[in-house]
Every structure is written in structure tokens, then in C-alpha cells.
Image: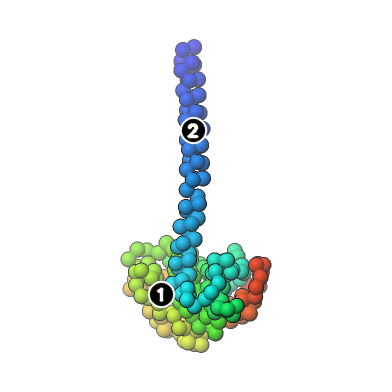
Amino acid sequence: MQLLKHMSISAVLLGGFAIIGSGLVAWIHQQTAPTIVANEQATLLRNLHSLVPPDSHDNDLTRDTIQVRNEALLGTPEPVTVYRARQNGEPVTAILNVIAPDGYSGRINLLVAIRYNGELAGVRVINHRETPGLGDAIDADRSDWIHSFAGKSLDNPGPAGWRVKKDGGEFDQFTGATVTPRAVVKAVHNALKYYAEHREQLFRPTDNTSDDAS
């Protein structure tokens, strides 16, 4: 009986600690959630403004968005966010949040900024799991490689040039890491193709999701 009593007390104590612990975790999450969201928003805005400077548009990039789908060209079956930059109501740049699905270590999340005339304003990698010291050279703070896209378009270089040099194209690869830059080059090229096909739709003032054919 004494053993059973001790076991019951222990069970009650453990249950109490579990409830208190769960409550504490929920409370901490509730208190920190707004800060986390604010930090994520600030990081997103910094990335957007690194591609589209604040003085080149007069609208709120994080509010002027559209959701689109096209797995073949945007790298995911899920909706993709497009941020629209405008000046005096006129379209300036579309920033597509696209996926390179075939990175060496998985998906690579990109922001591809395309000016209204179809020229790239720039590209940034915002999330990846590529190998440190090799594939992570796609990061803007690791090397200048990602800046090589600025000024390029579908016609500059032509179709054959939109490959890494190892495959006969114009873009550098990394020593010991060809898969990663190859995936990024392909994703950026596909984003340009998508933009060329849907430019007017992307700048249309609507919040509706567009289910484009793959």
C-alpha cells in the first residue's frame, strides 16, 4: 500500500509539472511570437530593399503582393508570393519568391527581382541547406557570385548561356560544388520565363491566387 501511495503521489507531481511546463511554454510562445514576426518582417524588407532600393518605389512592398502557382517554372506546387514595386502607380519591379528544388542538399529559396522591362534587378538566396565552404557561396555575404545575375535577361545571355560554364554556359560554378550554382541558374532562368509569359498579370491590382498551368 505504501508503495502504491508513493507511486500515486509521484504521478500527480509529474502530471502537475507537465501541466506547468506546457503552460510556461505556451506563455513564452505567446509573448515572443510578435517579436519573431516583427523580426521576420524586418529581414524580409531588408532583402527586398537590397534588390529594389526604397527610393525606386513609393508603395509598401510587403502589402502589394500577389500569389501565383506554376510548379514547372517556379519550382514548387505551392503558391508563390510576388512582391510588386510601383512608382506613382506605375510598375517598376516584380520580386518573385521562387524555389530551386534541386540544390545539392535540398530546396534553395530565392528572391528574383525582375524590372518591368524584363531585366534582372538582382537575385538573393534567403534560405538553403547547402554545404558550408562549398555550396554556401551562393549567399551574398559569402561571395559576389549571386550579384552576377544583375542586368541579365532572357536574351542576355541567350538560351545556351543560361548554364554554368561546365555545361557550356556563362555562369561560374564553384570548385567542388557544381550542383548548387547549376540549380540556382536554372531557377532564375525559369523565373524569367515565367515573368515574360505573365508580366501584365503579375502587376494587375488583385489579391487573388492565380492557378497557372504547369
Q: Position of residue 171 (x, y in %)?
A: 41, 80
Q: Which amino acid type is marked by label 1?
A: Ile
Foreground label between 1 and 2 = 2
Q: Which amino acid type is marked by label 2?
A: Ile
SS for dot 2: helix
What colour scheme governs how the chains and residues are painted in the rendered image of this protein?
Answer: rainbow
Residue pointed to by mark 1: 146
Q: Position of residue 100 (x, y in %)?
A: 49, 69
Pick the front one: 131 or 146: 146
Q: Please tell me whether residue 124 is drawn above or below residue 41 in the rendered image.
A: below
Q: Please tell me whether residue 92 is drawn above or below residue 108 in the rendered image.
A: below
Quick one: quadrant of the C terminus?
bottom right
**Identity of the residue drawn at 54% across and 85% down:** 117
SS for dot 1: helix
Q: In the image, 136: left or right of 121?
A: left
Q: Position of residue 206 (x, y in %)?
A: 66, 70
Q: Position of residue 129 (x, y in %)?
A: 42, 62
Residue pointed to by mark 2: 20
**Identity of the residue drawn at 36% across and 69% down:** 141
> Crowding at label 1, few (<14), some or many (≥20) Cα neighbours within 10 Å?
many
Pick the front one: 52 or 173: 52
> Crowding at label 2, few (<14), some or many (≥20) Cα neighbours within 10 Å?
few
